[in-house]
Image (cartoon, helix red, strand yellow):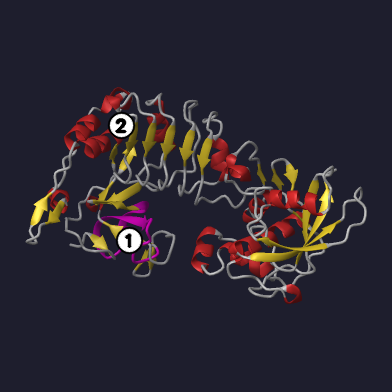
Amino acid sequence: MQSCLDIDNSGSKSGSDSVGFVMGQRVHLTGDTRRIGTVKYVGAVEWYEGNWVGVDWDNGDGKHDGSHNGVRYFEAQGPKTASFVRPHNLSSGVTLLKALEFRYHGESTKEEQDEMYVLSATNKKVSIELLGIDKIQNKLSRFEELTSVSLAYLGVSSAGPPGHINTTIPRLKELDLTGNLLFDWREIAAICKDLPALVTLNLSYNIMSHDISGMPLLNHIKVVVLNHTGICWKQVEMLKDSLPLVEELHLMGNKLRGITDIRLSENPIADPGKGGVPRFVFIARLAKVEILNGSQVSPRERKESEIRYVRLVMSKCHDNPEEIKKLHPRFAELKKFHGIENEKVANGATVPQKMSSSLISITLKCVAASIGEKAPLTKKLPATTTVAKLKILCESFFKIKSVKPKLFLQEEKLFWTSQGSPLPTLLDDDMTSLFDFGVGNGSTILVDEEC
C-alpha cells in the first residue's frame, strides 16, 4: 500500500493510520525538518484506502494543486505545490525544550564526524580534533547560563508545559526560531511569558495564524522579526497592543500592499542619514498609501515619486533584471504605467554606463528672488556629489553666503521617459548623491532659497 500520493514513496503502512492533524497545522516530512508545509486536507482519498493528509509545501516541491484523479480536495498555492501523505510520514513537531536538548546536548552523528577530516600527503583521511570544543560544548550544555539560542529548522511547534522553559533557560535574551512549525500565537505568548529576560525574538519563515486575539501584554520584548510569516497589516496593528516597547519590527516578505496610512517617525528606515530611504521610495513601493507620517500623498506627489523611483532603480540595477525583479516587485508595473523607456534621453544627452564613477555636465540656474538675476552656469561634477556638497558649491558659484540654498531638478523631459514633467523635483535629501537622484548629462538644477 502506498504511503504517499504524488510524492516519493517512502515506506508503507496499513489503512488504519491515526490522523491527529488539523487544518492549518504546520508539519514537516518525517526525517526532514526543512521540508515544511501546511495541512490543507485530512481524510479519505478516492480509490485509496485509509486516511491521508493533504499538504501544501512551502518550497513548492509537490505534484498537484490539491486535486487528484479529477477530484478537488483543497486549493494549493500553486499548480504543483501539494501532495497527499500518509499521517505516519509527517511530524507535527516537538516542544521548544526538546529542540533545545537536541541542539545543544545531542552528540555528533557518524556522518558529521566523517566530514571532519583532511587528506594527508598519501591521500589518507586524517580526523580533525577541534581545540577547545569540549569547553565550548560544556558551556553550551549548561542551559541556565545561555543568553542566546538558535533553534532554526528543528521542528519546534509548541512551548511545552508551563514553567519548564523558565526553569531551564531563565537568562535567555535572544531566541531564533526561524523555519519551525509554529503557527498559533498562543504558543508564542506562552514562550515569551516563560522567558522574562527575552528581548529579541525571530519567527521568520513560520507561517503564523491570522488570529491574534487574546495575546497578553509582553512588555519586555524589544526586537521582533516576522519576515516571511504571511501576516498582513491588520495583524501588525493587533500586535502593537501586546508589544508596547518594541523598538525594531522586521516585516520583509509579507502581504502589506493594502496599507493606506503609515507612520514611521523616529524610525531608522525613514532616516536616510541612518541608512534608511527617502519619502518618495515609500510612496512608490506602497501602492495604496494615502498618508505618510501624517502628510497626505497627493496624486502629483505619487506620480513624481513613482517616476523618480523607477529612474533610481534603473540607475542602480541597470544590467541586473533578476535583482530588480527580486528587490523591486513594483518596478515593471510602474515602468509600464508611466511609459518609461530604457534608453530614450532628451536633447541627445547620454546616460553613462557607469554613472557613479563619471563626470556629468549639469546646468545650475539661480531662481532665488532675493539674489537677483544671475547667469546660468554649466559645471562638470562627479555623479557621486551629494546634495549637501552641491549646496556648498552653489554658495561659492553664485556668491550667496547669506542664503541657504534649496535645489530642484528640472528637465524638459525625464531620462528614460517619453513623458514630459513640467514640475521640478525637490532634492530633499542632503546625503543622497546626484547619481541616486537620477541627475545626468544635460540636467538642469534650479537653485532657490529656503523660506
The picture places residue 160, in percent across and down from the top left corner, at: 30, 31
Looking at the image, which residue is at 19% across and 31% down? Answer: 138
The picture places residue 132, in percent across and down from the top left corner, at: 19, 36
Q: Which residue is mark 2?
A: 160
> Label 1 neighbourhood size at 10 Å, few (<14), some (14-19), many (20+)?
many
Residue in the foreground of this view, choosing between 282 and 127: 127
Residue in the foreground of this view, choosing between 334 and 20: 334
Q: Nearer the viewer, mark 1 or mark 2?
A: 2
Single out the residue that lies furthest toward the bottom: 348
Upstream in sequence: badge 1 or badge 2: 1
> Label 2 neighbourhood size at 10 Å, few (<14), some (14-19), many (20+)?
some
Separation of marks 1 and 2 at Cα, in angstroms: 29 Å
The stretch in magenta equals: 37-65
The picture places residue 217, in percent across and down from the top left corner, at: 50, 26
Residue 222 as seen in the image, left or right of residue 89: right
**Amino acid type of the residue tagged 2 in the rendering:** Gly
For residue 30, say whether it is visible.
Answer: no
Q: Which residue is mark 1?
A: 83
